[in-house]
Image: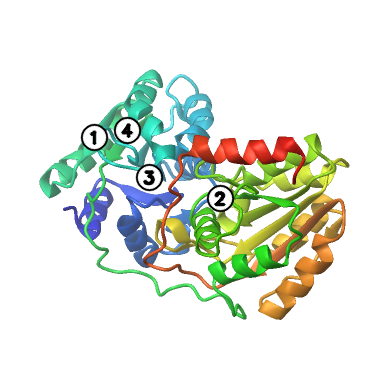
Amino acid sequence: MISPESFYSSLESEGVSFLAGVPDSLLKEFCAYVDAVLPPEAHVISANEGSAVGLAAGFHLATGQLPMVYLQNSGLGNTINPLLSLADREVYSLPMIVLVGWRGMPDVKDEPQHVKQGRVTPALLDAMEIPWRELDGDPTAAREAATWAAQTAKHTSAPVVLLVHKDAFSKAEKRRPAVVMDGAEMTREHAISVITATLSSDSVIVSTTGMISRELYEQRVNHDQDRSTDFLTVGSMGHASQIALGISRSRPETRVVCLDGDGSVLMHMGGLASIGATNVGNLFHIVLNNGVHDSVGGQPTVAQQVSLSGVASACGYDLVGETVATESALIAAVKDLGSATGRRFLEVLVQPGSRSDLGRPKETPLANRDIFVSRLRSGRS
């Protein structure tokens, strides 16, 4: 396996002096290491992958030095525009190394949302005419790949990609202390349980990708609750609120709830403006804020430094509740805002972390879609 410390040293020796990206489960040990050892001016956990490319571009323009961007291949879509219309050698010709976790790699078992993305990743890179190599966990090959990537990026003055296999990195030699969400009394799973028990039974829920959908699903199974009210967004991070908005606008008589996360909201924060600017539908947007990217290693988000409630208010939501952090306050807020109409927003502070034995949905995404659509279109919601 590849030592995160050794791999970063190889990059550093080739002149890489700035990193930006979105944490990924396959890269979590490398991400944990650089987050622990690099100062803020040398490392940014960005809101989305395209923003990381922009940060890298700005760094190179200002310094002439070589940056690295890191991400999961599910986030490649967010990078396509800036990689091709900004960094490409036919436009501004900006060198950078792009480290990509290869989820859904062929012949490696993975979740449904990653399978096609993983299968087409090499072809996508080839279509973008970006040179790439794989990191399979061999330490010697990793050092050689770091040298190849840096020298190729500098020689061509353009992006290059390193595709990282599952389990390529060993445990991080250093890591930052775990994030603590001040004032939060509830786990995210407990908060979800409180919310679903308090919401009107005619509500439909769109839950964001990652732990939130998994915890919502497991609660429904454990308590023998109706799962047909829930659309589990297993991929498409950052878009759950817009799925909910699309449903709400199309079926204004339906009480639609979006269970969102802080990292998801930050990834495409413009969605809040779209919700606030509409005057159609009945949407209750609940953000469970634990201040970290919990599904991919617990790296911090900026949500502890940004007032998400303040952003929602500025975007024009009809009602924005006071941020809550306790069970009693959450129950009161869900009763109050849940019974109102229009576009409402509630931020819930929760503790980072999740159960180690947390399960995953047993049904396929298509099966989830079918039972959700059947209920939604029948008018039973």
Q: Are marks 1 and 3 in contact (CB under 8 Å)?
A: no
Q: Amino acid at mark 4?
A: Ala
**In the picture provided, is 177 more to the left or to the right than 10?**
right
**For the residues carrying marks 4 and 3, which lies nearer the camera in this image?**
3
Dot 2: element = loop
Q: Which mark is residue 194?
A: none
User: Residue 216: where, in percent of width, then height?
Assistant: 55, 58
The earlier-in-sequence mark between 2 and 3 is 2
The earlier-in-sequence mark between 1 and 3 is 3
Dot 3: element = strand
Q: Which mark is residue 153?
A: 4
Which residue is denoted by mark 1 in the rendering?
107
The earlier-in-sequence mark between 4 and 3 is 3
Query: How many residues crowd around disc 1 within 10 Å: few (fewer than 14), some, or many (20 or more)?
Result: few
Which residue is denoted by mark 2 in the rendering?
47
Which residue is nearer to you in this view: 284 or 131? 284
Q: Which mark is residue 68?
A: 3
Which residue is nearer to you in this view: 130 or 204? 204
**For the residues carrying marks 2 and 3, which lies nearer the camera in this image?**
2
Q: CA distance from mark 1 to mark 4?
A: 30 Å
Q: CA distance from mark 1 to mark 3?
A: 28 Å
Q: CA distance from mark 2 to mark 1?
A: 31 Å
The correct choice, above or below, for 118 with respect to 309 in the image is: above
The earlier-in-sequence mark between 2 and 4 is 2
